[in-house]
């Protein structure tokens, strides 16, 4: 039966070429716009570490004085002080834990032809790589002993290794960072979680190709590197390690609900202990799962969310338009419907025929919409945004384009099909 | 024109009529908000800034040894000042619209809570003339004040004098002169010695509406904190001066990372995101209006086709060409009016939603008026074709049986 309906649909398209083309283009424009923005939105709000994110938690404490709170709306401070971060790392109460900050580094290539350049570096404690499952191409990360000895070692990203050493195994060679030499102990494989969850509020980019160098926190600080972001809650004149300043993100790995509950107890006890010591004035704390943390901080740029809303309003307008055109088209064919009914076609059969026609428009519109979406994504790749280079259509979005197009056209087809099957055969036959 | 017959006939084709109303309503709601947002982007991108933007270039120098920064900066500036075509050169911590903003909260009373993110400008000797500040009251810094300017370990300036933006002066001391008044932050106090026309913030998007034109200038002697050079020349010489300055600095500081831009480019880059958003909105609006217009054409043509016989009868009993044309135009006007009214309610609702969830202001009424007028006009134009075809139905049509 479907074959017959499709044949009828094709005949009707041929009869009304202009109207059909108009419907297909309208639908395709709506689909193209919404799939473009949806792809970007999905890319920006995706899970950065799908296999691990359920076990990763972000820790927040509140060292701020009561009379000078971090935020007027009572948010917890985004980052931690060095003292708290190190206390938590050294307590070893989670399976893995790391304190992280970002820094701007000047990298000086060994060859004289290349100029020095700036890049973003991660300063972290030893568990960083194992906790976030960063894959190594050569060598490995550093140990807790390296942390404590302030060893001048560095792990570099794959693209930096390609740029400076032509992709060869550079473990053991030295890299000049901020005019000091660091020994390379590891080279990562391509690794750049999107969004870069661990960089939130630390000052690094939230999207893009990833940091170039990874340094032990204490070694980097000993070499005079400063974090990009820091917020003080009292006039401070001391070194960052003792200052009333928040500048570190703390992540912990907790395998199951029991571990989470135990860690919460530990944090509550820690906050109370700090209150007793006079360091804290409030005992509240936060322990958020990775995805919950990203959602609550609205890491997706406002512009992108607004564009998605706009694109879907546009799709809605296109759908209303398609409903109108389909309706006009099928009411014009009342005569044909009357004949089919008189020859024994049931209402369901008429309904199915018009839905098949709408679905066909949806599929063609989807194919054209895919073209528009590819063009839209190409336009986004030309923009200066930090996520621009990532905007590509993957298999899942490719398939969902057709799903959305088919759904949109079928929804748009319901009203015209219903009107069509409500046509009474007798008057149509008489007038014909 | 009597509208009663039109109203009487509308219920006969309820669904197509409702679809036109709905389409116009949605288009109107999206159009009003999109045009409003485009206007905001344009206004943002043209935000006034009382410095000589056309003649200014900025060079960021990073990665120099901070212990020797004072000597480096003095030596570089001396070399830059000898460039032909250069009028002034100076060091500054960060230009307006610069990437790494430095903020502080200042107040006009020692104990008050700061409410505004004010941009902190640490300027080196001669920066007033190099930026092309417009002094409204008071004086600029003296050589001695420059020599004393440095940052204390608590990140506050050791200087005792500041220049402030006009907006801050008005906010803190409305109706009085700001000269000689004190401003405070973190236990330090400074005396206002001059007021300049508003210079835009270092990162206006972050500073928010209140901090957009809040800026405080401190004198600063050459140091690691003043790591941007600003160069002023005639706009015609600007690109050449910048290029020569980059070469000069490249030779003087082989280990440094240099990044030079004209201020015009700096502004364009800062507002690139909002400019792209504006263009996308314009594109979507144009396509959306086209789609809406085509939808109206399609539906109206359909019901003109349906009513050929009635039109023929009207023509046969004496209706003129113009009357038939007016009939369809009026019908569309009535539908558009219903759509526009619904659309304005929707537009207002969307605006309230955006205000609550995004940094969007309240939409002034004239955007609603403009959007409504645009859709009325669009409806009238879209219906013109089908209406002309309807008007040209010959009276003889009435005698045919179909």
Image: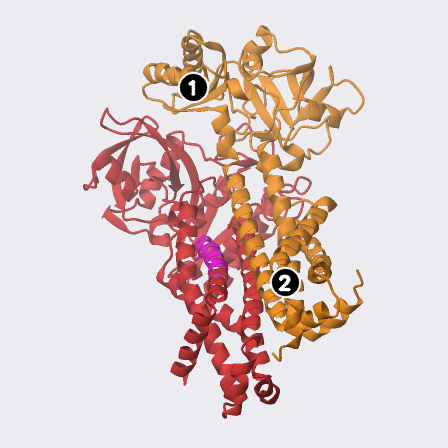
Chain colours: A red, B orange
Q: Which mark is residue B392?
A: 2
Task: Tell me which segment is drawn in magenta.
Answer: A28-46
Q: Nearer the viewer, residue B303 or A416?
A: B303
Residue B7 versus residue A239 in the image, above or below: below
Q: Residue A401: where, in percent of width, then height?
A: 43, 64
Say which residue appears at 63% left-offset and 57% top-offset: B384
Q: Would residue A286 be seen by someone viewing this image from the given angle?
A: no
Q: Quadrant of the N terminus of chain A?
A: bottom left
Q: Would residue B321 be seen by someone viewing this image from the given angle?
A: yes
User: Does the magenta segment cover residue A24?
Assistant: no
Q: Quadrant of residue A158?
A: top left
Residue A253 versus residue A347 in the image, above or below: above
Q: Residues within 10 Å of mark 2 (few under 14, many from 20)?
A: some
Q: Earlier in the sequence, mark 2 or mark 1?
A: 1
Q: Nearer the viewer, residue B328 or B320?
A: B320
Q: Which residue is mark 1?
A: B239
State left or right for residue A64 relative to residue B321.
Answer: left
Q: Residue A3: where, in percent of width, then height?
A: 38, 81
Distance from disc 2 to disc 1, alpha carbons, whole Å, reads 64 Å
Residue placed farthest to the left in the image?
A168
């Amino acid at each position: 039966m479907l074959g017959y309906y499709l044949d009828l649909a094709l005949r009707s398209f041929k009869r009304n070429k202009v109207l059909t083309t108009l419907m297909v283009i309208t639908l395709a424009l709506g689909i193209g716009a919404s799939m473009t923005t949806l792809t970007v939105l999905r890319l920006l709000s995706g899970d950065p570490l799908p296999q691990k994110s359920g076990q990763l938690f972000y820790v927040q404490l509140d060292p701020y004085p009561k009379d000078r709170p971090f935020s007027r709306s009572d948010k917890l401070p985004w980052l931690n002080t060095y003292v708290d971060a190190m206390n938590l790392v050294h307590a070893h109460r989670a399976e893995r834990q790391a304190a992280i900050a970002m820094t701007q580094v000047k990298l000086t290539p060994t060859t004289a032809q290349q100029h020095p350049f700036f890049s973003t570096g991660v300063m972290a404690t030893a568990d960083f790589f194992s906790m976030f499952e960063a894959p190594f191409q050569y060598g490995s990360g550093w140990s807790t002993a390296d942390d404590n000895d302030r060893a001048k070692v560095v792990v570099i990203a794959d693209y930096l290794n390609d740029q400076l050493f032509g992709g060869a195994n550079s473990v053991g060679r030295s890299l000049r960072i901020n005019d000091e030499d660091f020994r390379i102990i590891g080279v990562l494989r391509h690794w750049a979680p999107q969004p870069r969850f661990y960089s939130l509020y630390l000052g690094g980019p939230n999207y893009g190709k990833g940091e170039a160098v990874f340094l032990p926190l204490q070694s980097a600080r000993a070499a005079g590197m400063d974090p990009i972001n820091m917020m003080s809650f009292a006039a401070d004149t001391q070194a960052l390690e003792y200052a009333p300043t928040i500048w570190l993100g703390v992540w912990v790995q907790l395998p199951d609900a029991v571990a989470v509950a135990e860690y919460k107890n530990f944090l509550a006890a820690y906050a109370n202990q700090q209150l007793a010591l006079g360091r804290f004035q409030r005992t509240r704390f936060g322990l958020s799962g990775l995805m919950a943390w990203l959602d609550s901080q609205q890491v997706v740029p406002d512009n992108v969310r607004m564009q998605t809303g706009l694109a879907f309003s546009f799709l809605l307008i296109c759908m209303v338009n398609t409903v109108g055109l389909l309706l006009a088209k099928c009411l014009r064919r009342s005569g044909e419907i009357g004949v089919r009914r008189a020859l024994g076609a049931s209402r369901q059969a008429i309904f199915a025929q018009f839905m098949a026609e709408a679905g066909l428009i949806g599929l063609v519109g989807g194919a054209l919409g895919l073209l528009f979406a590819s063009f839209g994504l190409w336009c986004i790749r030309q923009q200066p945004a930090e996520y621009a280079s990532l905007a590509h259509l993957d298999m899942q979005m490719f398939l969902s384009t057709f799903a959305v197009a088919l759904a949109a056209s079928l929804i748009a087809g319901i009203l015209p099909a219903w009107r069509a099957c409500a046509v009474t055969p007798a008057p149509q036959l008489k007038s014909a | 024109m009597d509208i009663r017959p039109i109203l009487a006939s509308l219920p006969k084709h309820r669904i197509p009529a409702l679809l036109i109303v709905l389409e116009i309503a949605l288009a109107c709601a999206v159009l009003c908000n999109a045009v409003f947002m485009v206007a905001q982007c344009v206004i943002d991108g043209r935000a006034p800034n009382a410095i000589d933007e056309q003649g200014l270039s900025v060079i960021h120098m990073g990665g120099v040894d901070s212990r020797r920064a004072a000597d480096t900066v003095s030596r570089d500036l001396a070399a830059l000042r000898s460039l032909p075509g250069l009028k002034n050169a100076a060091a500054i911590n960060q230009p307006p619209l610069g990437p790494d903003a430095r903020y502080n909260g200042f107040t006009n009373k020692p104990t008050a809570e700061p409410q505004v993110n004010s941009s902190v400008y640490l300027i080196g000797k001669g920066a007033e003339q190099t930026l092309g500040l417009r002094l409204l009251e008071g004086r600029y810094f003296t050589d001695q004040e420059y020599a004393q300017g440095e940052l204390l370990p608590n990140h506050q300036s050791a200087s005792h004098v500041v220049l402030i933006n006009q907006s801050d002066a008005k906010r803190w001391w409305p109706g009085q002169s700001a000269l000689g008044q004190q401003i405070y932050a973190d236990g330090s106090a400074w005396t206002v010695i001059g007021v300049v026309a508003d210079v835009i913030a270092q990162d206006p998007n972050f500073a928010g509406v209140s901090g957009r034109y809040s800026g405080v200038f401190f004198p600063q002697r050459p140091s690691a904190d003043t790591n941007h050079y600003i160069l002023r020349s005639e706009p015609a010489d600007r690109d050449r001066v910048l290029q020569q300055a980059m070469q000069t600095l490249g030779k003087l500081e082989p280990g440094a990372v240099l990044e030079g831009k004209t201020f015009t480019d700096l502004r364009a880059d800062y507002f690139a995101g909002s400019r792209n958003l504006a263009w996308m909105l314009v594109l979507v609006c144009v396509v959306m209006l086209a789609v809406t217009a085509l939808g109206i054409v399609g539906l109206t043509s359909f019901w003109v086709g349906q009513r050929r016989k009635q039109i023929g009868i009207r023509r046969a009993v004496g209706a003129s060409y113009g009357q038939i044309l007016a009939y369809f135009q009026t019908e569309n006007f009535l539908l558009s009016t219903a759509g526009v009214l619904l659309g304005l309610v929707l537009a207002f609702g969307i605006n309230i939603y955006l205000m609550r969830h995004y940094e969007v202001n309240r939409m002034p009424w004239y955007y609603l008026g403009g959007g409504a007028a645009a859709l009325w006009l669009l409806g009238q134009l879209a219906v013109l074709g089908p209406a002309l075809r309807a008007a040209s139905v010959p009276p003889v049509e009435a005698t045919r049986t179909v």
